[in-house]
């Protein structure tokens, strides 16, 4: 795994995957708690509001793949990350958080996440090369899982210092950082050496 990250130069893409996963997990965790405890929103209404994100992501995912095939993966991934930042930024600056207002803002972020996901993974696979596809896939999943773990923990700790709205604000910053990292071009990959051949007697 270290060889894939070092030789393919995809550290920036993995960092973007981690940052966006952490932003997503942090916002969803904080919103689920805040809407029910502070705003008095029912669990059903809270769940429906939060479903706007994956629903929009499901719609945008196939579109992101087609756009990446036509216009290259990098610009599509960057636009997706910026759109995630816009959605979370709109959430952070909203005056109040009724479920409908939360839902459409999460839908904007979900559209961005759908656009970015496939192209970002394609960038890693292309840089790693076909002989390292499985290992590259595992590193992407590791970065994503780490983000899902770190996001809620960091958001909870920081919410105690700056309030619940600190989470969406930091998620916005994380998404912008991801967009910046995605603009970095991976190094030209080094083909894996052929397996050693035994000496014939």
Image (spheres, helix red, strand yellow):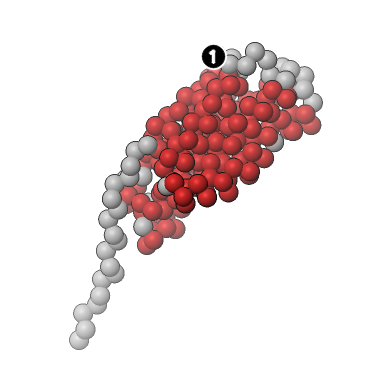
Q: How many marks?
A: 1
Query: Image quarter for residue 12?
Result: top left
Out of 22 and 80, give the one closest to the viewer.
80
Q: Is residue 34 visible?
A: yes
Q: Name the residue located 53 percent from the left edge and 45 percent from the top edge.
A: 64
SS for tag 1? helix
Q: Please tell me whether residue 3 is drawn above or below residue 84 in the rendered image.
A: below
Residue under the point 51% across and 25% down: 172
Q: Position of residue 138 (x, y in %)?
A: 46, 52
Query: Image point 58% across, 49% down: which residue?
Result: 62
For label 1, count other residues whose C-alpha is less than 10 Å away and answer few (under 14), some (14-19) or many (20+): few
Relative side of 156 to 32, left or right: left
Examine the rendered structure and indicate whether residue 71 appears above or below residue 25. Answer: below
Image spot of residue 67 (x, y percent): 50, 46
At which x and y percent is residue 31?
65, 25
Horizontally, is 170 left or right of 187 in the view?
Answer: right
> Which residue corresponds to mark 1?
161
Q: Nearer the viewer, residue 135 or 115?
A: 115
Residue 112 at x, y percent in the picture: 55, 36
From this viewpoint, which residue is outermost toward the front? 70
Q: Is residue 97 above or below residue 129?
A: above
Q: Quadrant of residue 41?
A: top right
State the residue at coordinates (64%, 35%): 53
Q: Quadrant of the C terminus?
A: bottom left
């Amino acid at each position: 795994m270290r060889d894939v990250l070092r030789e393919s130069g995809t550290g920036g893409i993995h960092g973007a995957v981690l940052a966006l996963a952490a932003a997503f997990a942090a916002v969803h965790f904080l919103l689920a708690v805040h809407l029910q405890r502070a705003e008095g929103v029912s669990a059903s209404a809270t769940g429906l509001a939060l479903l706007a994100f994956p629903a929009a992501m499901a719609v945008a995912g196939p579109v992101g793949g087609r756009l990446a095939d036509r216009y290259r993966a990098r610009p599509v991934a960057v636009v997706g990350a910026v759109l995630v930042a816009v959605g979370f930024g709109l959430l952070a600056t909203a005056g109040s958080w009724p479920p409908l207002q939360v839902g459409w803002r999460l839908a904007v972020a979900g559209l961005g996440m759908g656009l970015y996901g496939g192209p970002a993974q394609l960038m890693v696979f292309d840089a790693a090369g076909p002989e390292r596809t499985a290992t590259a896939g595992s590193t992407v999943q590791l970065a994503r899982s780490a983000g899902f773990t770190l996001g809620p923990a960091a958001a909870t700790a920081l919410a105690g210092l700056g309030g619940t709205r600190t989470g969406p604000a930091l998620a916005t910053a994380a998404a912008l950082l991801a967009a910046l990292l995605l603009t970095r071009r991976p190094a030209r990959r080094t083909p894996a050496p052929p397996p050693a051949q035994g000496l014939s007697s």
